[in-house]
């Protein structure tokens, strides 16, 4: 909201600058008409800019891989995953000792897999295998990022775990953070095989349109949104246990959206309240985050018990 207020103050200042000479001449009606025209022109220009630059607002990929799990002394395999449409995805598989549980990690919209090492270290500490991959266009993965592409990439990563690691689907947890929550939910709802062990959605929005309307309430986002990422719709059709994690302190994706996702998810499900900001809460409050994952693993394991 502060940014929106600043924008309108700037527009008001511009209008004042244009209107003042006319007001001094006493041409009130022409000034009003001129002002309305300027407002409409600015509004239209902002709408066009938002439409044109949606891709850059949504996807913020980093090509440079700045570190690897080896920097944290984690054992890992540097692998390449091929998608059905010919993309090659860069990925890391981190095995834990004697683990029968694997997390498939769908990361957020900025950076690449090298910026998620702290979470990978936590999974290893908890005795959980993990596979993290870069969407097409991120890191060393080929191609250009698209909504359909991110879903295909996740399904390909899931298939890789099945084919290369001989893991049954019911031992794999789909986990998505932020944008990755939307990706993981849609992948879970569209798996063409046995459902995964569970879906974990952390700090995720209900849909692209909803988060766009939250930031730009004065624009008809729904009319020109080029993306859907309808997490709310997808999570209603997920055939596995669901865990939703969200912080009331999240300054980027409203806590209310996490609550709505939890309400929409079918049972069995759990909700965990994190603390702290969107990008740092899981790291700053590591003990809490660790306990959330311990309870998550326990909850999902209980659902697998006959």
Image: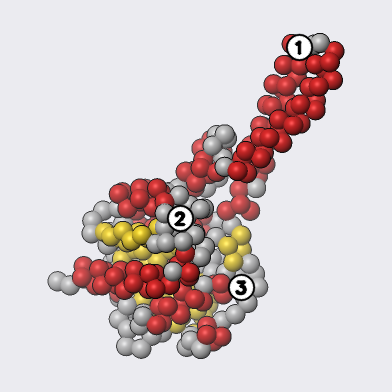
Query: Mark 2 packing: few (<14 Cα in 10 Å), some, or many (20+)?
Result: some
User: Do we see residue 269 in this rendering?
Assistant: yes
Which residue is found at the position 47% from the left and 88% from the top? 75
Query: Mark 3 packing: few (<14 Cα in 10 Å), some, or many (20+)?
Result: many
User: Do we see residue 104 in this rendering?
Assistant: no
Which residue is found at the position 61% from the left and 60% from the top? 60
Label for residue 249? 2
Q: Say which label, 1 or 3, has the lower sequence index.
A: 1
Q: Say which label, 2 or 3, has the lower sequence index.
A: 3
Pointer 3 residue: 140
Which residue is found at the position 21% from the left and 67% from the top? 303
x and y percentages locating residue 102 in the rendered image: 36, 76
Nearer to me, 25 or 226: 25
Pick the quarter of the image with the C terminus.
bottom left
Which image quadrant is residue 48 in? top right
Vertical side of 278 occupied by 41: above or below: above
Q: Of tags 2 and 3, which is closer to the observer? A: 2
x and y percentages locating residue 97 in the rendered image: 36, 88
How far apart, in angstroms, are the residues tagged by discs 2 and 3?
33 Å
Nearer to me, 151 or 300: 300
How far apart, in angstroms, are the residues tagged by discs 1 and 3?
60 Å
Which residue is found at the position 55% from the left and 56% from the top? 146
């Amino acid at each position: 909201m502060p940014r929106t207020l600043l924008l309108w103050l700037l527009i008001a200042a511009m209008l004042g600058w244009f209107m003042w000479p006319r007001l001094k001449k006493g041409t009130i009606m022409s000034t009003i008409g001129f002002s309305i025209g300027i407002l409409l022109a600015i509004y239209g220009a902002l709408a066009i800019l938002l439409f044109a630059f949606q891709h850059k607002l949504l996807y913020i990929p980093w090509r440079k891989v700045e570190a690897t799990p080896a920097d944290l002394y984690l054992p890992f395999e540097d692998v390449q995953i091929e998608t059905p449409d010919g993309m090659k995805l860069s990925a890391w598989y981190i095995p834990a000792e004697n683990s029968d549980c694997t997390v498939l990690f769908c990361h957020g919209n900025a950076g690449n897999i090298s910026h998620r090492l702290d979470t990978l270290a936590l999974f290893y500490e908890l005795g959980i295998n993990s596979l993290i991959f870069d969407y097409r266009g991120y890191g060393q993965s080929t191609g250009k990022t698209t909504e359909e592409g991110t879903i295909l990439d996740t399904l390909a990563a899931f298939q890789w775990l099945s084919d290369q690691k001989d893991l049954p689907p019911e031992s794999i947890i789909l986990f998505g953070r932020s944008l990755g929550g939307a990706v993981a939910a849609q992948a879970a709802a569209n798996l063409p095989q046995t459902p995964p062990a569970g879906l974990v959605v952390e700090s995720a929005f209900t849909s692209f349109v909803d988060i766009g309307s939250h930031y730009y309430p004065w624009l008809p986002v729904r009319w020109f949104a080029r993306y859907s990422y309808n997490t709310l719709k997808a999570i209603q059709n997920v055939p596995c246990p669901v865990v939703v994690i969200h912080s009331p302190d999240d300054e980027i994706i409203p806590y209310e959206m996490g609550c709505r996702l939890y309400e929409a998810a079918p049972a069995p499900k759990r909700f965990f309240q994190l603390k702290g900001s969107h990008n740092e809460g899981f790291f700053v409050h590591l003990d809490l985050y660790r306990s959330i994952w311990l309870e998550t693993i326990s909850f999902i394991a209980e659902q697998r018990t006959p």
